Image (tube, rainbow, N blue to C red):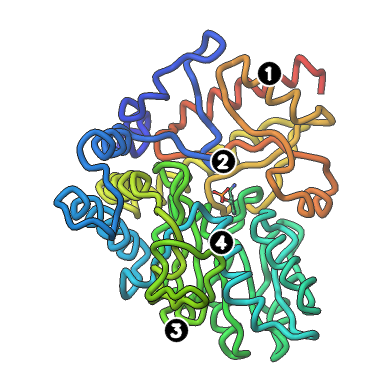
Amino acid sequence: MDRKEGVAMKQDFPLLKQHMNGKPLIYLDSAATTQKPQPVLDALHRYYTTQNANVHRGVYALAATATDLYEGAREKAARFVNAHSARQIVFTRGTTEALNLVASGYLRPRLQPGDEILTTVAEHHSNLIPWQMAAKQTGARLRFLPLEADGTLDLAKAAPCITPRTRAIAIAHISNVLGTIHPIQELAALAHQNHAVLIVDAAQSAPHHPLDVQALDCDFLAFSGHKLYGPTGIGVLYGKRELLAATEPVQYGGEMIDEVELLDASWKDAPWKLEAGTPPIAEAAGLAAAIDYLEARGRDTIQQHIADLTAYAYDQLSTLDSLTLYGPKKRGGVVSFNLGGVHPHDVATVLDAAGIAVRAGHHCAQPLMKWLGVAATVRASFGIYNTRADVDALTAALREAKGLFDV
Ligand code: PMP
């Protein structure tokens, strides 16, 4: 691969051809959402111009095409995470909805006072609040696995927290702030020794990390299409078959039913019982195109590219004194930092003037900000289109910002 290019050519992404504030756009916010390659845009356009019909219900040819497209996307998503079967894939609106579905449909009905749910202080709010609520509603207790100062998890210290009282462990595969990569397989083994389930928030790992749910042996795993170079409005919940079968619907209506009487109704099997209403059909077509796009580039190549770029960014940013980096060196594709005492929003504003899009704030992880002892951070995150030249531009703009703010 040419060092000057990302795994994917920037030209594949129409949005990246734009200028911002008179400068070529350097998009470093892929952890929030990724830009979309032309084949994904084409799939959405093709769907609405030639394939649009409601799924599952029609007997006409167009309805069959749309149904095949939607169910074909489910098969593709299953292969993407190496699930046994497409029946283990529930389409949701995103990671948030998927985790809420597990919390309300699977976990809450099983929780008793005194039961424990384990998570960490570093989670995205969408992998924290559903468990908070489930605990509050049932008298269960939410507990936090200890983290090292750099946000990594020491299994030897975590293991004693996992006991027969543990019903579930919910953890990000890769943190959206620190980039920490958690030992999912080992946590799954510890959970299973105690008859607990392991729920993985894969929002940040699915885009750039090959995923094998059978090797990880996780019980549930969630990710979002829009962080995977696909459309907004679609996400995936993978679940082991018996666990999805045991998950209660949390929404009721069309599509999910088997028989309906005036005073009673029965459900289809999973995954369909968990997908009430007209599903995100165009979005599923877009997600399938995104998966094809990633697979054509090679999932291992992508992982390597993101790892190289992130290590390069870590090294380059480390050369700036007064810049504090948070998290370990070995990490997923995000780099969070602060520049002296300068407010992260001010840093992001200076970078924006240079055409560089980064995020500043709490990154939907307020408890983690408190744990780090900061109000907010600046976060640069990388996608398949980013290059070392983008990192150099970031480093140069930060050097200028240092001068500007005199830190
Ligand atoms: N978990 C993590 C680690 C995330 O980074 C995000 C998105 N920032 C989410 C969950 C929520 O994803 P969504 O908003 O697509 O539901």
Amino acid residing under circle 3: Glu
Q: Which badge, 2 or 4, comes first in the chain's sequence? A: 2
> Alpha-carbon neighbours of circle 2 within 10 Å: few (<14), some, or many (≥20)?
some
Q: Position of residue 318 (x, y in %)?
A: 66, 37
Q: Residue at x 30, y 64 (%)?
A: 79
Q: Residue at x 75, y 84 (%)?
A: 115
Q: SS for tag 1?
A: helix
> What residue is pinned by disc 2?
32
Q: CA distance from mark 2 to mark 4?
A: 14 Å
Give the quadrant of residue 75: bottom left
Q: SS for tag 3?
A: helix
Total residue callouts? 4
Kindly identify which numbered label has been placed on residue 201: 4
Under 8 Å from ligand 1: the CB of mark 4?
yes
Left or right of residue 32: residue 72: left
Q: Residue at x 44, y 68 (%)?
A: 238
Q: Position of residue 97 (x, y in %)?
A: 56, 57
> What residue is pinned by disc 3?
242
